[in-house]
Amino acid sequence: MRKSIHTRDYAIFLELLIGFRHRAGLTQTQLGQQLPFEQPAISKIERGERRVDIIELKLICECLGVSLQEFIVELQRRIEKNAE
């Protein structure tokens, strides 16, 4: 079985995460300053080199001004749209 970080769904996850960061008007450095991990970790996450657990995702979402629920709903919508 292929690792989930190498799937189209994970690519959609990363695109969404980066998109929400851009919409929040934050650089990786600015986001990292608000989190318990800094810019290098944000960069690795966005490149798919470091996985994000659900607690980290919740923290990231809070910094980006989006609820975890809103993020997941949008992720599911995009994954389903891509499957059509």
Image (cartoon, rainbow, N blue to C red):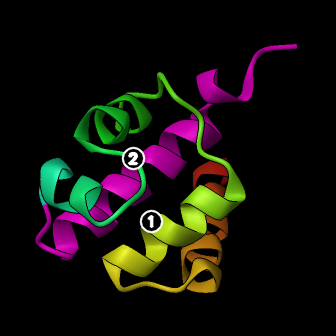
Mark closer to the chain start, 2 or 1: 2
Q: Is residue 41 left or right of residue 59?
A: left
Q: Amino acid at mark 2?
A: Phe
6 shown above or below 58: above
* Residue bearing the label numbered 2: 37
Identify the residue at horizontal 23%, vertical 59% (top origin): 33
Identify the residue at horizontal 47%, vertical 22% (top origin): 49
Q: Is residue 81 visible?
A: no
Q: CA distance from mark 2 to mark 1?
A: 10 Å
- Magenta segment boundaries in residue numbering: 1-26
Name the magenta segment's main secondary structure. helix
Q: Amino acid at mark 1?
A: Ile
Q: Position of residue 47 (x, y in %)?
A: 36, 28
58 shown above or below 51: below
Is-magenta flag for residue 65? no
55 shown above or below 71: above
Q: Residues within 10 Å of mark 2 (few under 14, many from 20)?
A: few
Q: Residues within 10 Å of mark 1 (few under 14, many from 20)?
A: many
Query: Observer-nearest residue: 19 or 51?
Result: 51
CB within 8 Å, label 2 to label 1: no
